[in-house]
Every structure is written in C-alpha cells, then in structure tokens.
C-alpha cells in the first residue's frame, strides 16, 4: 500500500439528495491529514454502510498535493408498497406503505403503513436515524394503533365420512 502525502482537499461528486455532511461525517480523513490507505478504506466502507448509496468510489490525484474526490451513486430512498389479500376468515385485506430512507437528504428514515380490512387493522408511523449529526446517538420513534377480531374454532367430526374434519366457529372476541 502507498501511504503518502498531505490531503489538500476532499470534494464530493454524485450526491443529489444526500447532504454533504452526511458523507463527510462517515469519512475519517480531513484536509491537512496525512493520507492513510486503511483510513480511506474504512471511510469508503462507512459511507457504503449507510445503505443510501449503490456505489462509492475514491479518486486521488496529486497536483502537487493529494486531492481526494469521493464519488457516490445514490440509491432511490423512497419506497411505495401495495398489496392485497383475501381469505375466508378475514375477508379482503389491504396493505399500503410509503417510506423514505433519506428524508430531506439527512439520512433520517420516515414513513407510514396501513394494513387490514373489516376484521383487523394496523396503522403505524415511524421516524428515526442511525446517527444524530456527528454523534453516535440515534433515535427511533414509532406510533401505532390497531385492532383484531379473533375467532375460536372447534373440530367437527363427520361420522359419515371419517376422513373429513371441519372447523366450526364457536366464538369471536
């Protein structure tokens, strides 16, 4: 490995939504530090580990001091999911979820979901981050509500056909 030179500047390329501080806080090297390969590799891994980028590259050039460029390719941080389900106990059910893993470019996760139908419902909202500014502190807030009708069944034996068992609903709570 080659470890040489004082870093004159660190520039960012490719971040469209993500704020520069989000990338810089994960990279341990700063201008005027001596370039150390192991710290550069650690920084690339840290940035990639935020799960906000599909690719992270580090470019170096010497003119006459070492200048670094961190080149990132952002993943889409917004997700919309939708689903349907039908069965003979809960009837029709709907699932919808909307979330953003990089709210306002700060690395904050936020979203809500709804699931259920006529016999059960769940609603949830969440907001959280893996790091508050440059600290190792985190937060994760969740609020939810829901209900569910439960059924109690018993087996019904059919003496005319001993190979067939039926379930009979005997209660609901």
Image (spheres, rainbow, N blue to C red):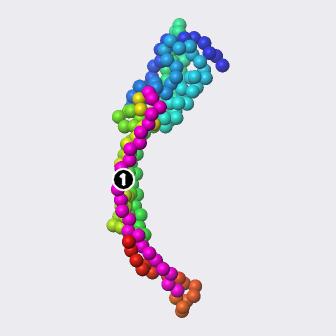
Identify the residue shown where x is 57% and y is 27%.
Answer: 42
Q: Which of 63 and 102 is in front in this view?
A: 102
Magenta range is 134-157
Name the spot of residue 129 as percent of width and height, x first.
Answer: 42, 38
Name the spot of residue 77 as percent of width and height, x first.
Answer: 41, 40
Q: Main secondary structure of the magenta part?
A: strand
Quarter where residue 35 is shown: top right
Against 160, is 2 above or below? Answer: above
For disc 1, the neighbor class at 10 Å (few under 14, some 14 to 19, many from 20) is few
Identify the residue shown where x is 52% and y is 35%.
Answer: 49
Is 76 inside the magenta-drawn segment?
Answer: no
Quarter where residue 133 is shown: top left
Against 90, is 112 above or below? Answer: above
Quarter where residue 23 is shown: top left
The residue indicated by pointer 1 is: 144
Identify the residue shown where x is 36% and y is 67%.
Answer: 119
Q: Residue furthest bottom?
A: 160
Q: Is residue 98 visible?
A: no
Q: Which residue lies furthest to the right in this view?
A: 1
Identify the residue shown where x is 47% and y is 31%.
Answer: 136
Q: Is residue 138 visible?
A: yes
Name the spot of residue 46 as percent of width and height, x first.
Answer: 53, 30
Is 137 inside the magenta-drawn segment?
Answer: yes
Mark 1, secondary structure of its residue: strand
Against 102, is 115 above or below? Answer: below
Against 106, is 37 above or below? Answer: above
Q: In which quarter of the image is the C terminus?
A: bottom left
Q: In which quarter of the image is the N terminus?
A: top right
């Amino acid at each position: 490995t080659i470890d040489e030179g004082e870093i004159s500047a660190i520039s960012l390329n490719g971040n469209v939504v993500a704020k520069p501080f989000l990338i810089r806080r994960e990279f341990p090297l700063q201008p005027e530090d001596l370039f150390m390969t192991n710290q550069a590799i650690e920084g690339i891994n840290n940035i990639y580990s935020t799960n906000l980028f599909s690719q992270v590259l580090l470019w170096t050039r010497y003119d006459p001091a070492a200048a670094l460029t961190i080149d990132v390719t952002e993943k889409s941080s917004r997700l919309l999911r939708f689903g349907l389900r039908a069965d003979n106990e809960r009837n029709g059910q709907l699932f919808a979820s909307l979330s953003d893993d990089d709210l306002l470019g700060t690395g904050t996760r936020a979203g809500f979901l709804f699931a259920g139908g006529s016999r059960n419902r769940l609603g949830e909202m969440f907001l959280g981050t893996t790091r508050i500014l440059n600290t190792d502190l985190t937060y994760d807030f969740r609020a939810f509500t829901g209900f569910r009708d439960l059924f109690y069944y018993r087996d019904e034996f059919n003496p005319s056909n001993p190979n067939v068992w039926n379930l009979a609903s005997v209660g609901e709570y």
